[in-house]
Image: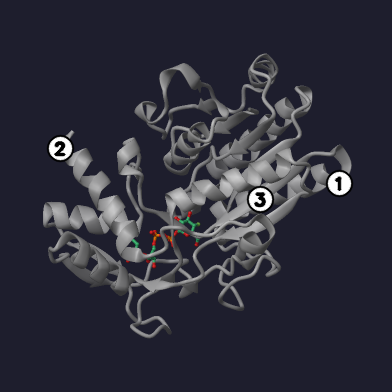
Amino acid sequence: MPTILVTGGAGYIGSHTRYFLQQRGYRVVVLDSLERGFREAVPNEILHVLDLRNTETIAMLLKTEKVDAAIHFAGYISVGESTKDPEKYFVNNVSGSLSLFEAMLHADVRKLVFSSTAAAYGVPDHVPIREDQPFAPINPYGESKVMVEKILGWMDKYQDFRSVRLRYFNACGAEPEAGLGERHDPETHLIPLLLTAVQTGKPITLFGDDYPTPDGTCIRDYIHVSDLAAAHIYAVEYLLNAGASDVFNVGTGVGASVKEVLEAVERVTGKPVPFTMGPRREGDPPSLVADSTKLQTKLGWKPQRAELDRIISDAWQFAQSLKTS
Ligand code: UFG
């Protein structure tokens, strides 16, 4: 079986993808700085603690481990933080990626799956969003991903460097049986914060109920992290089978409002969620829902755990395991 390098394999989506790659029989090498990842999310024997900017060391690692393809998750992911410190986002997300690509070229590894984001579309003209909607990021985080997507386009054209760019919508859920789930510090994402509110009794603030949506709260496409991980495996297999560079949205195609997610959390946990209604958060588009027809028809991917209650039930199981561990 081929060997896959996973950068950011100690992070949320990276750790789930590493797990499913190994389940499928791949040899996996994980690279993570552990600045934001969790050591316990990766088996020790495959973890290399390294910053992406160590180009030469990474090139050596790729050669000695005989890596066939890479899945590149490593990067900062917080929209809010990116607006406070844009330069930090460009250094980490763009320079880090460039260093990895340079190492890959040195080692003659020319297949890459890249973590991109729905933030690349900004406030879209049409929902559900297709991949051919133009780039229009409204924050430095989204811009950093767009920059890397563009670099990959040129590398495809002139350096025979093939990539699949996956634009994620709202990753959520967990794989509690594998001890994996969502943990960020500080946490900013809706579902873990709703679950924490249930656990602690401290109210969560909901960001605005005056949007042009049926109940006034923002609509998002919540995609189970294990379905997202599966999309990476389809993508890397497509590249290993000599597929051409391409871009795919990864979402369920079904939107849920903030209030609907809150109600689902109440159903699953059997407890009320304490909350207060606050003002809008800057930069939140009213509605982001994926059209993932392309991923389904071209690569044969289908979400298996699309129901909100299932997603929340997995996340809840993981949150409870954290509390007791
Ligand atoms: N929300 C609240 N209260 C909170 C946190 C979130 O009401 O305490 C709301 C947000 O306003 C938003 C929804 O819940 O309407 C989801 O918010 P998240 O922060 O969980 O996720 P985002 O949609 O903001 O962000 C996600 C990804 C980003 C990506 C972005 C694309 O996490 O990486 O989608 O717009 F950039």
Identify which residue, 56 or 264, lies in the foreground: 264
* Of marks 2 and 1, the one in the foreground: 2
> Which of the four quarters of the rendered structure image does ligand 1 lie in?
bottom left
**Residue depicted at 13% across the width and 66% down the height:** 272
* 204 versus 129 height, above or below: above
Identify which residue, 84 or 321, lies in the foreground: 321
**Residue depicted at 55% across the width and 27% down the height:** 28
Res. 157 mark: 1
Q: Residues within 10 Å of mark 3 (few under 14, many from 20)?
A: many
Image quadrant containing the N terminus: top right
* Left or right: 226, with 177 as reference point: right
- Name the residue type under label 1: Lys
Measure the C-alpha gap from mark 1 to mark 3: 15 Å
- Name the residue type under label 2: Thr
Res. 324 mark: 2
First in sequence: mark 2 vs mark 1? 1
Circle 3 is placed at which residue position? Answer: 165
Q: Are marks 1 and 3 in contact (CB under 8 Å)?
A: no
